[in-house]
Image: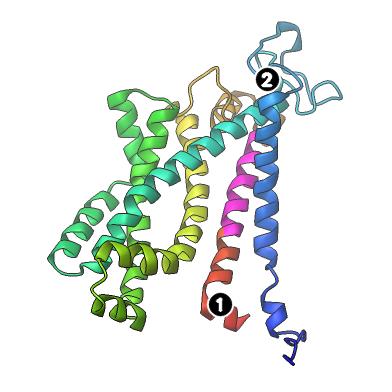
Amino acid sequence: MPVPAPSVPGGGRRRNRPGTQLIVGAALIALVALVALVSLVWTPYDPVATVASDRLQFPSAAHWFGTDRFGRDVFSAVMVGSQITLIVGFIAVGIAVVIGVPLGILAGMRPGRLGNLVMRGNDILLAFPGLLLAIVFGAVFGAGTVTAMVALGIGSIPAFARVARSGTLQVMKTDYVFAARAANRSEFRIALRHVLPNISGMIVVQCSVNFGIAVLAEAGLSFLGLGTMPPTPSWGRMLQESQQFLGSHDYLAMAPGIAIAVAVLGFNLLGDGLRDRFDPKMRSNR
């Protein structure tokens, strides 16, 4: 009869419990996602409707986060702005994963001339941060949400390529990969069956970290006028528009600022928690 795993501190059962960082990060992200989903079907007011009589009203029962200089409800704008934040993050990270992970696996499985060529191109791209690419793309193709998403996605490719290559090099040294090659399995099949499943944890962690970076970068671009264009609500643009009212109407900056901080903190904590779950060394230390 099997003996149950010990439940004492440091025992097997304790290690399977999610860490505090993972729980808090997932809760914060769930909050942002819930607000975005609710805003698809309901907001207290039309976030782009201007009402001259409601200009610069302080937070109250009618307007929880107050109103801006055009009489728009700040709470409704923050709710709709969460949609842009999540969309930009998903698309940017998706572009980086779809392009960067295959390149990293290819470089790891072909560490010779082909792998070096891929990584040198990756290093060249790494010299252009996503934020700088977004500024250049905005000047060439015009500022907008699509331009920001594409630029941030391309700028994140090197990070995913490096992570995928590092994990692939470790997997390629394992006995089951040697056995698969001895059985004349194709490189494509080895990559799908052995490499990708074993590096998926690293990729998920990188996705979480880069999602937070994309959220912050989109807010910065919108703050500079190179991201989401008006009248579509954006947390970064709300910060930019609140500058001239700092000191008299601080709530205009507090609402989007806290929203950005919650989203970025959530993804960073989630990334740290996932890293602890997937990294064997971190599990053993815990």
Q: Residue at x 55, y 38 (%)?
A: 86
Task: Locate residue 154: give its quadrant.
Answer: top left
**Screen quadrant of the N terminus:** bottom right
Where 38 sits versus 116, above or below? above
**Screen quadrant of the C terminus:** bottom right
Q: Amino acid at mark 2?
A: Asp
Q: Amino acid at mark 1?
A: Met
Q: Which residues are magenta?
A: 256-270
Q: Is residue 134 magenta?
A: no
Residue situated in front as seen by the camera: 15 or 5: 5
Q: Position of residue 143 (x, y in %)?
A: 38, 25
Residue at the farthest right position: 61
Where 21 sits versus 184, above or below? above
- N-term mark: 2 or 1: 2
Real-space CA distance between mark 2 and mark 1, rounded to the nearest whole angstrom: 47 Å
Query: Is 2 displayed left or right of 215 in the figure?
Result: right
Q: Position of residue 202 (x, y in %)?
A: 46, 64
Query: Which circle marks residue 282 in the picture?
Result: 1
Query: Which circle marks residue 68 in the picture?
Result: 2
Q: Position of residue 126 (x, y in %)?
A: 29, 52
